[in-house]
Amino acid sequence: MVKFEQIKGFVFDLDGVIADTSIYHGKAWHQLADELGVTWTEQLGNDLKGVSRMDSLELILKTGGKENDYTLEEKEKYAAEKNTNYLNLLKDMDQSAILPGMADFIRSLEEHDYKLSLASASKNSPLVLEQLGLAQYFKNRIDPSTLKHGKPDPEIFARGAEVLGLKPEECIGLEDASAGVKSINGAGELSVGIGDPEILHEADINFTDTSQVTLDNIKKAMDVMEMS
Ligand code: G6P
Ligand code: MG
């Protein structure tokens, strides 16, 4: 069992962990699902979290039984359309979109000399970090276009530790998506799930919202894990 004192780095998801952009991703996909005639459900919204742009489109089409109805060219057009809608929703986004407590948490990690990296599947993450005013904290980023496999595959979180020069067991991964928690666990890092504990039941530690994510609370939760 890993001890709090062994932890040297934190690997962050972005959408739904640092910023409330997962709501915008959901809105933009919902809009496209309506256009494609695929029924939108809360479950579909949750399953899409953490999933890459093209894989998300494939999942929506599969859910509607339409996986064989479109050519690759048409799918690329729909994926681009979703991204345009998403970018429109982001236009006026600023620091107020940082989720409660996350700016303080990120600053406290820096003050305590932890290393930080970003493991977001989003190709828009550089833009989002800039708009949030947090780019300077995340100089270590995984470019999702260099990945062989998306979440839930462990690749992105494994790379998140690697870029910091750390072993997976020296890192904590933070996620709001079930696919992301699976990726952290597969990479051998300690997983912190943020959101509904039923959906994120595979996480080592769960917080229902970002305001609970503090170094103190993580230490307390790890101490409890160690004792049990
Ligand atoms: C994140 C979000 C997903 C999104 C994916 C790709 O993982 O949680 O909702 O589909 O990134 O984002 P992109 O901005 O590249 O379309
Ligand atoms: Mg997320």
Image: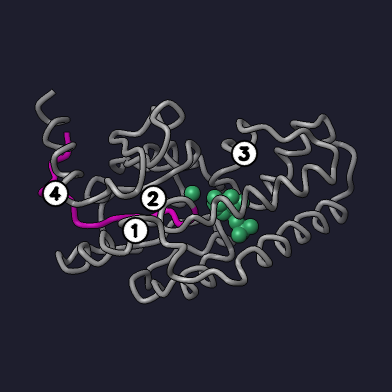
Q: Which one is nearer the viewer's eye here, 100 or 149?
A: 100
Look at the image and say whether residue 10 sits in the magenta stretch. yes
Dots 3, 4 in contact, CB < 8 A? no
- Name which of mark 2 and mark 4 comes first in the sequence: 4
Label drawn at residue 6: 4
Q: Any mark on residue 45, and which?
A: 3
Could you say whether the residue bearing mark 1 is in a helix, strand or loop?
Answer: helix
Location of residue 45 with respect to 15 vertically, above or below: above
User: Which percent across, then down, holds residue 215?
Assistant: 18, 51
Indicate the secondary structure of the residue bearing disc 3. helix
Query: Horizontal placement of 81 versus 160: left or right?
Result: right
Dots 2 and 3: beta carbons under 8 Å? no
10 Å neighbourhood of mark 3: few (<14), some, or many (≥20)?
Answer: some
Q: Secondary structure at mark 2?
A: helix
Residue 17 falls inside the magenta stretch: no
Residue linked to disc 2: 158
